Amino acid sequence: MAISFGQPSKNFQQVLELLHQAIQENPDVIVLPEMWNTGYALADLSQLADKEGQQTQRLLSQFAREHKVALVGGSVAVEENGQFFNRTYVYGKDGQLLTSYDKVHLFGLMAEDRYLAAGQQESHFQVDGVKASNVICYDIRFPEWLRTLMADGAKLLFVVAEWPESRVQQWEILLKARAVENQAFVVAVNRVGDDPDNHFNGHSLVIDPLGRVILQASDDAEGIFTTDIDLSQVEQVRGHIPVFDDRRPELYHWGGNLWHLKNLNY
């Protein structure tokens, strides 16, 4: 999706048009990119942000219910209780809200820490009985957070992003690493187009539990991209190398600036 900077009305119309195109493929899940309602017009959120996410929730809930499709609704700028959040809404096929998630790690290079409030909660939901989780963009640089989310048996990780072309190689490396270390499918959707400070070239990916790319969207091309995934691969990979069973969390520290081990004998 090519997001129009600071133009929520135009973006809402475009999202609805893209959703109608996507439903022609008869998908189980549709995923949108990050901050699709405003782009990174953070300085103007007091005029642009969706008040309590009401407009976004109406659109996503109605579409999911009418078309019987699950929606990982990208993320949008939301105003709530005098603060602004980068928030994802996830809807089930019955139009009911499954979860909402506020971006936990705010990205200073794009001034999120100046304008947004950080999320404090995990995200867990199910799609057709399959456990899943979701994060937003910069969150993927924090493997300890992703492991926290995925350790309950999730087989799917959804990632929505506005990841600039200048760092797109890191985007792919990080996503492959998150897939391999969590032995899960990663479905990652990035925007295309430009804002005043960045160029975004998409490079959306679906990656299997062995780190293999099974779908790569065309760079710099807005469009609908679909693939099928075989969730039995997750159990096969986890059965062959039981990473989650072999963890020793009693030795892991998660505080401060370092992720380190204690009580090691040399």
Image: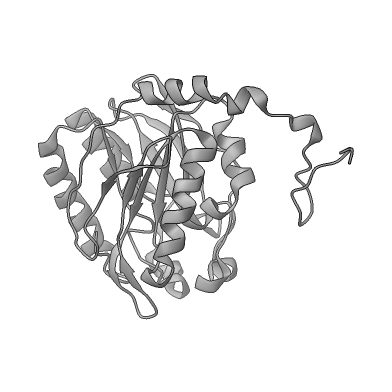
Q: Residue 160 at x, y = what percent?
A: 39, 51
Relative to 152, residue 110 above or below:
below
Q: Residue 255 at x, y = what percent?
A: 78, 48
Relative depth, front residue between 105 and 235: 235
Q: Describe residue 80's horizontal placement relative to residue 91 as left or right.
A: right
Residue 25 in view here: yes
Q: Which of the 4 quarters of the picture holds residue 249?
A: top right
Relative to 251, residue 55 above or below:
below
Q: Which of the 4 quarters of the picture holds residue 223?
A: bottom left
The residue under the point 13% across, 37% down is 25
The residue under the point 18% across, 45% down is 19
The residue under the point 24% across, 62% down is 219
Q: What is the quadrant of the N terminus in the image? A: bottom left
Residue 78 in view here: no
Residue most extreme to the front: 266
Q: Describe residue 42's horizontal placement relative to residue 262 as left or right.
A: left
Q: Describe residue 32's horizontal placement relative to residue 179 as left or right.
A: left
Q: Residue 192 at x, y = what percent?
A: 27, 64
Relative depth, front residue between 16 and 50: 16
Q: Which of the 4 quarters of the picture holds residue 114?
A: bottom right
Query: What is the total number of numbered labels drawn onto the structure image?
Result: 0
Q: What colour-coding does the image apply? A: one colour
Q: What is the quadrant of the C terminus in the image? A: top right
